[in-house]
Image (cartoon, grey):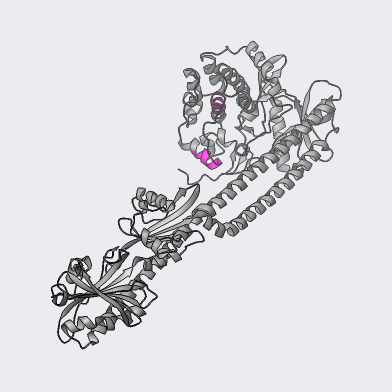
Amino acid sequence: MKTLRGSISLDRKLSGQYRRLLRNLGLLMLIILALAIAAVAYFDKRQVKDLSSKLIASTTATIEERFMSFFETAKSNLRIAIEQLQLSQEQDDELMKQLFFRLSPFLNQYQNVSGIIITEVSSANAYLGILKPKPLESEFLVRKHFPKEWGNDKARLELWKDGNMLESWIRKDDFDPKTRPWFEDALQAEENEIVTSEPYLFHTTKKPGITLSTRWRKRGTGQPFIAAVDIMLSNISRFTQAMRPTENGVAFVLTQDLRLVGLPADRRYSDENAVNAVLLKTISEVDMPILQASAAEWEQKGRTRQSFSFKFEGRSWWAGFEWNDDHPEHMRFWTGILVPESDFLGQQSLQRNISLTVILGLGFLLALVLTVDAVRKFRHDLREAVSHIGRKLGPFKLLYKIGGGGNGTVYRAKHALLKRPTAVKVMLPQFASSESAKKRFHNEVQITSSLTHPNTVAVFDFGQTPEGTLYYAMEHLSGVTLEDLVRISGPQPATRVLSILKQVCGSLREAHAQGLIHRDIKPTNIMLCEHGGLNDVVKVLDFGLVKEIQQDAPDLTQANALVGTPFYLAPELITNATVFSPASDLYALGGVAYFLLTGRNVFEGGSAVEICAMHLHDEPVPPSQRISREVPSDLEAVVMACLAKQPEDRPPSAEKMSEMLAKCQGYGAWTQEKAEQWWSSNRSRLPMEEHADTHSPLSDTGQLVNMEGRK
């Protein structure tokens, strides 16, 4: 049976290591998953946003550059046409009649110009217009309006091809250049300044376009004329239809009132007639759902000039709109760019996959390191657990390991003659050659053995192996530490807390009366036991840090070291570790009481230094404000008095504190019947063969902290 219990204890130890490994691997997997999600989010969102903004900006700049180049070319063409007219020797009406022969070669050369009109500024309504119906053919429709010859309401139309007039006819004419917006724009502008009209439908062809016009004078005569060239919007739309920012992205151009003047790439608009049928329509009037969705989102955002994302038919898109008005003499317009997010993801997939591979590779290496470290600890714990099992130390035979402390390992043992349960603490081998460690161990034994209070763990024997390893035997305790008590059943009733504190005060009263200070009172150093047929018997453990008030042993205490546990360290010990007193133990006991009542430490922080600073400067929150259950005011007053910053403001002694507890409401209400009921209900949940060795990272008994300069 004893062998079985030893096996169970060892199995629990290894199971704890296994659980820690699984916990660490699980945490590592969560970190890897978080990094993978972050990498995907970076490449799929942040970098895509950056790329989309850059792509939209560069595409917009390209369109603007092409448009400016287009208009500059058109303006240059108009100037060339005017220069051709300046070279002509004809005057007045003869000049107008000879214009066709001067300008038809010009129209053949510049395919983007679909027509030109010359009108006298001062005449009643004389003008000549040349229309090129088919851009790639040398066929022209000439419209002449000379009121002196045919009257104000008629014009002569001529059809020319390859330099020959095929037919001519006279017809009624209601066209008056002076009523057209481009005519007024040219009159208002400076002489020889070229202005661009807003997009509109041409009078003759009813096709969408724009007109560039200028006012000029014939050299020699000073006769004023206005010359204008027509440009079909379909010529402008060719730029946007041929441009794709990405494989599935599109570009388009809008007027201020959201009329289309440059169509996106779409197979439906490969024919010029289909293009002209859509141009100058608003987005809402055309069958382009993606444009309508982007424009609606853009309008909601107040026509922002920042790129943005939106959803359309379950897909994510990026959009950007830019207003182009840097050259007011040209057409002003909005450039729109739409790109599906999937196009960017395809570009980023390689970088994303490389990043994910690196993250997974590092995760695998870390997992391997954790696994190897865990196996090493398994082997170490296994060797340690079995190294002394069955060994005899004086009259004691070691049965199995039940725990460990800072400087030794605790084993369940049996006396060769006596039958009572015994625990033997054996100094760790690495300390066997250290005289300082031996003194500490010897000091712990001497002090503990001198204390006989029933609430202090009892020491039976002390010895040394031939190899120089020290050990001592003490009573074997069956119970639970206060830390495990709170972990198992949460904050404790005030009546039970009173019972526990009263017993601890009894143990400390004896120690303090002998001039001994525990210096490490904390939940893991106080056990609640089933002992001598009684339940809830308190045992104060681990007197390894006990100090005699009258004695100074510099070899046992490091200078500038904080000896104790930060969560329960009195303020005066933080600033000067040598000023220990009974009041410092009572401060720690106040922290234990706080923990029992609330399930939380008085101060909690991310580091020992931060917690120590709180002990020095922060006032504790009363327990009643940390939990929903009621805390008796008199008990709370005792706890808060123990937690006073100044030692003189705390209870003057453990005995006095015991008296204060005895006067609290509910003292004595925690009976043996209640205790027995609790133990019966929770015995299966209690740690088996545990000893006070489950310290958290902030519960090391030795903390070296430089507190100089802290305020």
Q: Does residue 604 belong to the magenta stretch?
A: yes
Q: Is residue 640 left or right of residue 565?
A: left
Q: Quadrant of the N terminus?
A: top right
Quadrant in which residue 674 is drawn: top right
Q: Position of residue 621 (x, y in %)?
A: 46, 29
Relative height, residue 631 to residue 119 (above, below): above
Whether residue 227 is visible here, answered yes or no, is no
At 70% from the left and 20% from the top, the residue drawn is: 683
Q: Quadrant of the C terminus?
A: top left
Q: Position of residue 459 (x, y in %)?
A: 74, 26
Relative height, residue 385 to residue 366 (above, below): above
Q: Does residue 529 belong to the magenta stretch?
A: no
Q: Position of residue 283 (x, y in %)?
A: 36, 53
Q: Main secondary structure of the magenta part?
A: helix
Q: Is residue 430 left or right of residue 201?
A: right
Relative height, residue 508 to residue 226 (above, below): above
At 22% from the left and 77% from the top, the residue drawn is: 192
Specify the segment rendered in magenta.
591-613
At 56% from the left and 58% from the top, the residue drawn is: 346
Q: Is residue 105 left or right of residue 404?
A: left
